[in-house]
Image: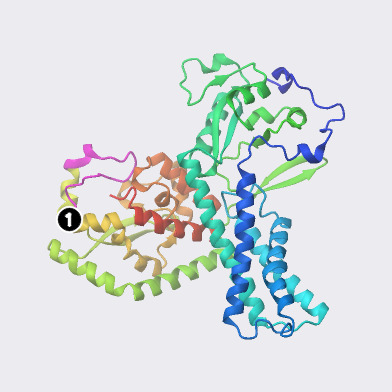
């Protein structure tokens, strides 16, 4: 159904743009970002002031170049420099609502601001022939960067808490497209409540007949004026899904019709499970082509990952040796038998290896497995039970805290595994066919996207989807993010059994 059939009741201005473009472009129905941005500005300013105060109190030569002008130094340190930070942060887009609340782009722009501020201060000092201590510049700039990042991180956590618990600080969306496309987008955006995207209605373009007998998570409409529907359900965003944006010129006209209404327009193309860095827009003669890069499964970044894995595994085994010894003693006291459990698993490119784990089950666990198959809580290749009688008491503690996985650092050191990657699957389940086999393009990991997204509470299909997403969108930054999230998942003990 073309957008002309939506019967918009409020035509756009005759010239195609709002009459007062400057003021109307800021009149968004979604207003959470305004107070949130104001809080960030205050936090950024205070962070820069705090960094200047620490440098002044720590370094004796902090006021070099202003020793006879303490008032000017105080004004520069506690007013001019913090204001400069805020201006630079604003100019690089770190207050842009598109980057607030989710993803790493906000923090990247803060880091970019750090470079700009350091360059500006150095250039100003050179131009005015002011003597500045390099230690002072480093401490003030580095301290400001540290405090700004910390404050923004905690501000984001508060925003996520508000989105999860109260729904405040979120965008209410009307999905436009065919029912399957709209439901696919609904599933994607609701996987992460912290993203702040709440679908409240679906406007289907293929008629209500396609909905008969199908249960939908939100009300479904057809043949309605979309702008009126947005106001009726209290939404502030229209999401055009998949092929609904395929009609030539229709999406452009929809954007025109939304000008000055305060309603945001987003497009959800049929590029599911592809991370943003792999997608680039290449406009050719006014046609915005989406270019999708191949996954990065080789090259310098991959070599760096392998090197960091080996170094981290060696240092980890060295630092954790007392803990490993204590766990080994606890296992021997709990149940006679070997300390380690070594099971064949399928690794990189289908090669089989033996994974190292602390034994958490009684020695006859494999023999008893056949009698428990019907109690399997997992719907995939792995056997999982929330109350597995084969696990002894100390073993349950090890599993809940994930300490039983620590010996896999040996596999990482040998190059059989990585710190981050898909979990290694048992080797006795035969050849992996279809999409599952793509997991073998990378080395399995001690932790991964599956583990930080729900672990054993996830269905097999969802776990495979997450592993494939990691394979296709891997990066060093992504690995660091997963390692950071692993710490909190382990502390919460969610999905570990």
Viewer-nearest residue: 390 or 20: 20
Can you give x and y, in whole percent of width and height, for residue 371 in the image? 16, 41
Residue 461, relative to residue 50: is it above or below?
Answer: above
Which residue is tagged 1? Answer: 393
**Secondary structure state at the residue bearing disc 1:** helix
Q: Is residue 302 visible?
A: yes
Rendered location of residue 432, percent (x, y): 40, 46
View extreme (right): residue: 15
Residue 189 magenta-highlighted: no
Name of the residue lying farthest toward the front: 71
Residue 91, image x, y percentages: 74, 57
Which residue does the image show at 43% across and 53% down from the upper left?
422
**Quadrant of the rendered image containing residue 290:** top right
Q: Report the residue at 49% width, 43% height from top.
A: 162
Please name whichever residue, 202 or 67, is drawn nearer the observer in this view of the structure: 67
Depth order, front residue of 26/405: 26
- The residue lying at 41 percent from left, 39 percent from top is 461
Q: Position of residue 35 (x, y in %)?
A: 62, 46
Rendered-image quadrant of the N terminus: top right
Look at the image and give the residue range highlighted in magenta: 371-391
Q: Main secondary structure of the magenta part?
A: loop
Q: Residues within 10 Å of mark 1 (few under 14, many from 20)?
A: some
Query: Which residue is located at x 74 percent, y 73 percent?
Result: 121
Task: Say above or below: 88 vs 426.
Answer: below
Q: How many marks?
A: 1
Which color scheme did the rendering employ for the protein? rainbow
Q: Is residue 445 visible?
A: no
310 versus 360 height, above or below: below
Relative to residue 323, is residue 146 drawn left or right?
right
Q: Nearer the viewer, residue 245 or 142?
A: 142
Magenta run includes residue 388: yes
- In the displayed structure, 197 sits above or below 73; it is above
């Amino acid at each position: 159904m073309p957008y002309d059939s939506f019967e918009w009741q409020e035509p756009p201005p005759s010239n195609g743009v709002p009459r007062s473009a400057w003021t109307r472009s800021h009149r968004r129905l979604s207003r959470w970002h305004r107070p949130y941005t104001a809080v960030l500005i205050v936090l950024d300013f205070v962070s820069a002031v705090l960094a200047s105060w620490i440098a002044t109190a720590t370094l004796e030569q902090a006021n070099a170049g202003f020793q006879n002008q303490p008032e000017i130094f105080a004004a520069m340190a506690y007013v001019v420099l913090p204001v400069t930070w805020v201006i630079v942060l604003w100019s690089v887009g770190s207050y842009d609502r598109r980057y607030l609340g989710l993803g790493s782009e906000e923090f990247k722009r803060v880091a970019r601001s750090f470079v700009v501020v350091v360059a500006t201060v150095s250039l100003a000092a050179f131009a005015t022939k002011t003597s500045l201590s390099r230690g002072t510049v480093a401490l003030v700039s580095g301290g400001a960067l540290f405090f700004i990042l910390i404050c923004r991180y905690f501000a984001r956590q508060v925003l996520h808490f508000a989105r999860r618990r109260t729904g405040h600080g979120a965008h209410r969306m009307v999905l436009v497209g065919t029912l399957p496309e709209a439901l696919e987008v609904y599933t994607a955006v609701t996987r992460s409540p912290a993203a702040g995207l709440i679908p409240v209605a679906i406007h289907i373009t293929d008629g209500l007949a396609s909905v008969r007998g199908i249960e939908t998570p939100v009300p479904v409409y057809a043949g309605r004026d979309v702008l009126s529907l947005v106001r009726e359900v209290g939404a502030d965003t229209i999401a055009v899904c998949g092929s609904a944006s395929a009609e030539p010129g229709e999406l452009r006209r929809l954007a025109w019709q939304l000008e000055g209404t305060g309603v945001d327009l987003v497009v959800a193309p049929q590029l599911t499970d592809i991370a943003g860095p792999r997608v680039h827009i290449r406009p050719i003669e006014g046609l915005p082509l989406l270019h999708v890069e191949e996954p990065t499964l080789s090259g310098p970044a991959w070599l760096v990952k392998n090197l960091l894995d080996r170094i981290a595994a060696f240092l980890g085994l060295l630092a954790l040796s007392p803990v490993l010894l204590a766990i080994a003693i606890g296992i021997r006291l709990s149940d006679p038998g070997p300390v380690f459990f070594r099971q064949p698993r399928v690794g990189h490119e289908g090669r089989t290896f033996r994974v190292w784990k602390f034994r958490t089950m009684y020695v006859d666990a494999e023999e008893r497995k056949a009698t428990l198959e019907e109690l399997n809580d997992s719907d995939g290749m792995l056997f999982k039970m929330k109350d597995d009688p084969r696990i002894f008491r100390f073993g349950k503690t090890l599993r809940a805290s994930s300490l039983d996985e620590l010996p896999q650092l040996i596999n990482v050191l040998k190059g059989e595994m990585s710190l981050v990657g898909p979990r290694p699957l048992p080797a006795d389940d035969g050849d992996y066919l279809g999409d599952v086999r793509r997991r073998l393009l990378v080395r399995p990991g001690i932790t991964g996207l599956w583990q930080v997204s729900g672990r054993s509470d996830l269905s097999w299909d969802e776990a495979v989807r997450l592993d494939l997403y990691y394979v296709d969108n891997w990066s060093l930054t992504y690995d660091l993010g997963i390692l950071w999230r692993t710490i909190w998942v382990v502390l919460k003990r969610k999905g570990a059994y």
